[in-house]
Structures are given as structure tokens and as C-alpha cells.
Amino acid sequence: MTATESHGAPPTPDRSEKRRALGLLSLATVLGMSPWFSASAVGPSLTALWQLTPAEAAWLTMIVQVGFVVGALFSAILNTADRFSPRRVMAGGAAIAAAATGLLALLDLGFAGALVCRFVTGFALAHVYPLAMKVVATWTLKDRGLGIGLIVGAVVAGSASPHLVRGLGGVDDWRLVLGIVAALGFGGAVISGWAGQLGPYRAKRPPFQWRHIGHAFRDRPLRLANLGYLGHMWELYAMWTWIPVFLAASYRAFDPECEEATIQQAASLCAFGTIALGAFGSYGAGWLADRWGRTRTTMLSLVISGSCALTIGFLFGLSPWIVTAVAWIWGFAVVADSAQFSSAISELADPDYVGTQLTTQTALGFLLTLATIRLVPTLEPSVGWRWAFAFLALGPIVGTWAMGSLKRSPDAKRLAGGRG
């Protein structure tokens, strides 16, 4: 035992071992989370096949969010993160999500069966993403914002991957897209067997406790951080869900003579770029937040993404180069702040109920996404794409106010090593 260890301080991880662990964890997360938006990516095909209404098409994504919330609460109540090996939990979650996606591709399940498969997918992925966050926290300390940003970036890249698969050759074959995504998910499950190794900063996470849920809004610093997160979530998943449809409609309006297959392929590839760029945003924001402060970083991200939500509709039908450029800026910023809200909660909450607060934050955020995912297709027929995304800017407005208030409070000193 070293002198450092004898005094109770955890040993510093070997740099090469840390890089290997985080690299494998990121790869497992990218592949394991790939089923998330798989049905959304092939939404146009499923909508035509099953003659879905806009509301029913929205449920292909919304039911995944419901499954994720239920899975997160189930995991928190049973405290699976501490009772079982993270690598086994991650591998099991990724495998079940992949299997549910594969069944949807192989069997003629119809819309009702698809909803069941998508619910199971969300439930299973709740045992991948949060577990990856737990593992990365055991490898990082002063660079935790960067580390969690790395995992969020991996989640973003995985979520974007079905659009890439569709754009590279699956426009006319939705079963092929889902089959490939399922295979990617199984690959993530296999790699999770090596990627779940805990680092030296491991600590038992406090169990979920119902009586502490109210602290999320009774304690002012937690309330402000949660309002910032909810403002972020108000915008994020609605944008991810409907940006491919918006891009296809805009490209079609610009060139009505263009073949539909070409439009769908371009929309899928550009939607992939829009979502995937968020991975770089998450990584960059994590690096910045550890040095500049979480409140400033989240406010900057919210202002940029909210501005894009307000303006992109006015570009509808203009040159695809202009529309895509703004969409990519939006994609870069819209998720950049995500990891920092989780980091803020872990720094502001009482250590005795930090697990409960993180679970509460996640559950509230994903439940909120049900409203905005459903509202976009409801508004679009009435106000058109020019205004359909504009209401999403309400979230960043509230979030910016909340994080600005937190920045001006004495509690900001507890964030990012005193940087606020």
C-alpha cells in the first residue's frame, strides 16, 4: 500500500489504462445506443407502410422515452448500478435493445407490436447510458465534466447512426436499416464485457429514496439546475426526432423536380451530420466547463441552440447548403450542455441523495420530451415549418435564465471546482 492510499486518497489511474478504459466504454456506448432512433430513422417508410397519422408516427419515438423513464426508475429503485457488475448490466441492456430492434426487422409486427418493441428498447437502454456515466465517473475526478461529456458524445453518435445507415443505402429497405442497427447493438453488448471495468475513484452510489425527490425543487440550487436541464430537454429530443422530416420537406420545396429517393437520402445523411455533430459539442463543452465553469458553458450552448430554433424555420425552402449549415450548428449546440447539468447536480446535491437527484432529473427530463415530440407534428400543419420549431426556443430561454440565476448565487462556488 502506498502512502497516498494509506491516508484514504484513491490512487491516480495509469494514463494508458484510463485511455483504454474510456475508449472501450465510448465505443460500447456508441454501438449499444444505436437502436435508440432506429425506428425514427425509418419513420417515413413505416408511416407509409402502416398508414400512420402524425400522432402515431410521433409515438415511435415517444414510447422509447417512456420505456427509458420506466427503466431508469426500475434500475434506481433496485440499485442495480451497485448490486451488479456494470459490465454485465450494460451488456444485458445493449443486447435486449438490439434484440427488440432485430425482432421489429424480422417479424411483421405491425404498429402495435412496434410500440412494444420500442418500449422494451427504451427500458433496456436505461441500463446502458446511465451505467456508462457511472463507470466514467470512477475514472475521472478533476476532468469529470470532460469525461461525462465524452460519454454523452458517444450516446449522440450512437443515436445518429441509424440515419447514416439509411442514407448509405437503406432508403428503400427499412428492414435492412433495422437489421444493421441491431447488429451494431449486439456489437456494443459484446464490447461492454470489456468496457465496464471500474476505475480507482469508485464509490458506492447512494440508493434511490422516494422521500428525497422533493429536494429537486425545494432546494434552490437544485431547482435552478433542474430548470436549466428541463429547458435543454424541452428542445433536444423534439429537434432530433423531427429534423430529418424538416430537412426532407425543405429540400423538396427547394427543388420539387428532384426524385424522392434522392431527397430522402440527402435528408438522412444531413440528419446524421446534424445529430452526430453534437458528439463534438458534448466533448468540447465538457472541456470548456471544467475550465470556464458549468453555468457559463450551459448558458452559451442554450443561447446558440435557442437562436437556431427560432431562425431555422425562416430558411425553409432556401438553398440546402444554407439550411443544412444552420441545422449542423444547431446540432452541435443543442446537446453540448447535456452532461454539464448532470455534473452540476452531482456537485450541488447532498451526497446522501445524489443518486435520487440524478434519477429524478433524468426521469423528469425524458417525460417532458413527450410533450414537445408530440407538439411539433401538431403545430406544423397549422403554422408550417416556418414556425413549427420556434416554440422549442422557450426551453433555452427558461434554461438560460435559470443557469444565470445559479451563476449569480453563492452556490455557484460548488460547481466545477469553484469556477461556477
Image: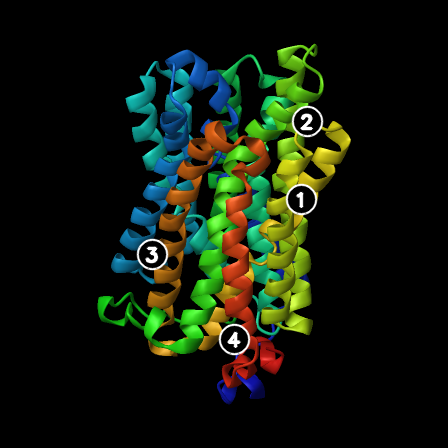
Determine the CA span between mark 4 and mark 1: 28 Å
Residue 157, above or below 136: above
Of the two numbered discs 4 and 2 on the same chain, state the one appearing first in sequence: 2
Looking at the image, is 313 positioned above or below residue 337?
A: above
Helix, strand or loop under label 3: loop
Return the mark for residue 406. 4
Quarter of the figure that contains the C terminus: bottom right
Q: Is residue 29 left or right of residue 100?
A: right
Task: Give how far apart the Cα atoms at labels 3 and 2 are.
Answer: 52 Å
**Amino acid type at mark 4:** Leu
**Residue occupying image coordinates x 57% and y 86%:** 4
* Earlier residue among tags 2 and 1: 1
Residue type at mark 1? Leu
Query: Element under label 1?
Result: helix
Q: Mark 3: which amino acid?
A: Phe
- Camera sees residue 262: yes
Instruction: Tell me the tag on residue 317.
Output: 2
Tell me how far mark 3 sits from mark 4, CA to CA: 36 Å
Q: Classify 10 Å Cα crowding around label 1: few (below 14), some (14-19), many (20 and above).
A: many
